[in-house]
Image: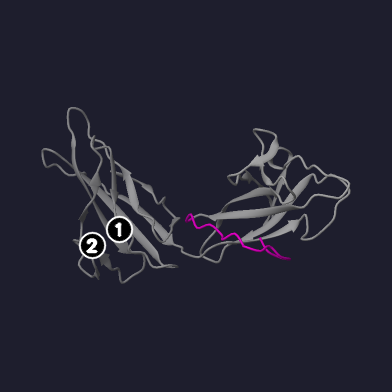
Amino acid sequence: ARTIFPVDSGYIGQTGIVKGTALDAAPGRVDRVEVRISSGNSPRWYFNGTDWVTTEETWLTTTLSANGTFWWYPASPWVTNQSFRSESRVYDRSGRREVAYSTVNFNADFTVPLSTALHPHFNSDFELDITSVEARASDAPPGSVSLVEFSYYKVTPPSGYWDRAAGNWGSVPELFYPAAPVGGDKFRATAGSTPTWVTTAGGITYRVFARVTDQAGNVNNKPDNPGANTQ
């Protein structure tokens, strides 16, 4: 058996579950996969499906896919900012057990990351084309930023989100475009990740949102009313 999530030295969110793959050499077939979940620090505690105990032999039976190649354990006993370990082992239908365990160590992170739009600045007027959009993104330790994306909204009617595929501002669903790290905690979108800005003699108002996803899958909240030094 192999654990595919979370990855070793990775992160898991509040509702994340341990899952992986299983295989038995033909003509054998996987019968079941068991997982042992423990705290990452000594003295080690083991999850028995309900509580944390000191008994090591607390192997839990996972849910197995119909073809026996994918498994998952449907529980999330994590505590934020704590480290954990997951070990998995597979049995075939003859009762033989895998000799080596698949082991991953990971951290639980429930903290929502933060972002601050830097450019264009809040309530700024521009008479020249905006060629890049920039934001600052961060996550409290032990978390780490994984992805920063921008959405662009045209507030002035006819309103809508920028749709790169259609080449217009007519999207009702919010669409996001990736930004690249440029050093420190700053991220920038350029070229195809920025919209084609349009204007009129009276000017057009736009709204930019920087969405941040951390390594555990936590996503920052979009503010209802944007302001200076916000997302």
Residue farthest along the front direction in this orientation: 157
Q: In which quarter of the image is residue 30?
A: top left
**Dot 1 crowding, Cα within 10 Å, few <14, some 14–19, many 20+:** few
| Magenta-colored span | 216-231
Asked whether residue 155 appears in the rendered view, the answer is yes
Where residue 92 sits: x, y (%)? 16, 39
Q: Quadrant of residue 116?
A: bottom right
**Dot 2 crowding, Cα within 10 Å, few <14, some 14–19, many 20+:** some
Where residue 187 sits: x, y (%)? 68, 52
Residue at 22%, 31% in the rendered image: 25
Task: From this view, report whether residue 31 is shown above or below residue 182.
Answer: above
Q: What residue type is disc 1 on?
A: Ala
Q: What residue type is disc 2 on?
A: Gly
Secondary structure predominantly adopted by residues drawn in magenta: loop
How are the colours assigned in the image? one colour
State if disc 1 and disc 2 touch (CB < 8 Å). yes
Q: Can residue 7 be found in the magenta stretch? A: no
Asked whether residue 99 appears in the rendered view, the answer is no
Residue at 67%, 36% in the rendered image: 164
Quadrant containing the C terminus is bottom right
Location of mark 2 (residue): 49
In front here: 173 or 71? 173
Residue farthest along the top direction in this orientation: 27
Location of mark 1 (residue): 75
Where residue 3 sits: x, y (%)? 34, 47
**Left of 140 or right of it: where is 186?**
right
**Label 2, label 1: how far apart the Cα atoms are:** 8 Å
